[in-house]
Image (cartoon, helix red, strand yellow):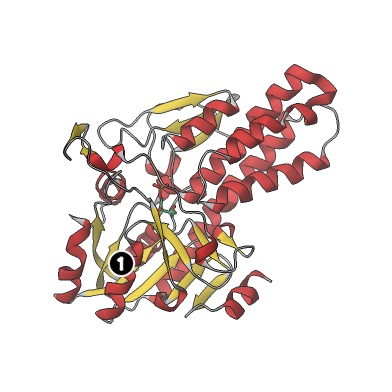
Amino acid sequence: MKTTPPTTPTPDDAALWHEGRLYLADQRVLPERAEFLSYERAADVAEAIRAMVVRGAPAIGVTAAYGVVLAGRAAHAAAGAGWKAAIDADLERLAASRPTAVNLFWAIRRMRACIARLGADDPTDALLTEALGIHAEDRAANRRMGELGAELIEGPTDIITHCNAGALATGGYGTALGVVRSAYAAGKIRRVYADETRPWMQGARLTAWELMHDGIPVTLQADCAAASLMAGGGIGWVIVGSDRIAANGDVANKIGTYGLAVMARHHGIRFMVAAPTSTVDMEVASGAEIPIEERDPDELLGCGGRRVAPQGCVARNPVFDVTPAELVDAIVTERGVVLNPTREKMQALMA
Ligand code: MRU
């Protein structure tokens, strides 16, 4: 636990608990402004997840766990010994905040298991211990994935990444960008090409910010520039994170990831997914069963707060897609690496 009041967030300290409050770096305003918002109510935490104050699958899970701490504290203040009956509405609010990242449901399930072990006393301290544990485990998992992913890269090479799978999207260090950090430190990565990632611009705003913070050479490109870059040579790997991996190894990630995987295979470039096992959902048989979030078309109809499409224009805004397992060369988790994923290999990993 921090002992000083939070001031300015850094990529590795974007979510933290301090003196009874949850602090989240507001990822909607980065990098223009690096500032914390503070939360004392689970319903507000659920809204922060929905509104993208915090985003990225593992970060959503960590945040929801802290949201359950706030829910437990409020339920005990309102209902005393009957707090377990009073907490459910908040747990449901948190679970309804976003549909695709399974880390959200994984974290709530783990907090529910903790709740089941508790008695009638104030649950705040016990729930906080569990949430801090989830946070610390995620950081450790990312470090381990960084090592394992870096081992796969021969290098020195350039790589492409999509969206933001960095410290901001996790409990710290990052999944895909954790691999980048470790591989860069080992002299295996020359430069990262970051797709800008329409419409929320996670690549332009967050990935570029994080890599520049670390002094890792980064070049921003339009999402549609990846194919011509690949054709020019010099790209060894595409490295991305994931929001949910199905039991057969299909990978849901930010919209555009599937196209990158197709292009990578065409150009003989390898495709790596770095994700903790909290992102693996063995209850969905294939990617076809993964719920894909559709957000407000208005996010797409404008840019930078200004409308660009004609009034009345129809738009679709699915924010994730599914990359079939056969296009994935490696899934890197904290438990180990799965090369050319199949149902059997995923089962062995998760056993
Ligand atoms: O809509 P977002 O910004 O939550 O989407 C995030 C992604 O797609 C990330 O690539 C994914 O969550 C992996 S984060 C380590």
Q: Is residue 5 visible?
A: no
Amino acid under disc 1: Gly
> Taking 186 as reference, is 217 above or below it?
above
x then y, percent, for residue 223: 22, 57
Residue, far top: 78
What residue is at 25 percent from the left and 56 percent from the top?
Answer: 195
Q: Quadrant of residue 274?
A: bottom left
Left or right: 337, with 82 as reference point: left
Left or right: 74, with 186 as reference point: right
Q: Quadrant of residue 41?
A: top right
What residue is at 54 percent from the left and 68 percent from the top?
Answer: 286
What residue is at 63 percent from the left and 65 percent from the top?
Answer: 282
Residue, far front: 312
x then y, percent, for residue 160: 27, 64
x then y, percent, for residue 320: 40, 55
Q: Which residue is mark 1?
A: 259
Q: Which quadrant of the rendered structure holds the C terminus?
A: bottom right
Local secondary structure at mark 1: helix
Left or right: 84, with 183 as reference point: right
> Taking 134 as reference, is 285 above or below it?
below
> Taking 304 as reference, is 134 above or below it?
below
> Taking 187 as reference, is 173 above or below it?
above
Of residues 5 and 177, the one drawn nearer to the viewer in this rendering: 177
x then y, percent, for residue 66: 60, 35
Of residues 183 and 44, the one drawn nearer to the viewer in this rendering: 44
Left or right: 133, with 56 as reference point: right
Q: Quadrant of residue 158?
A: bottom left
Q: Is residue 324 visible?
A: yes
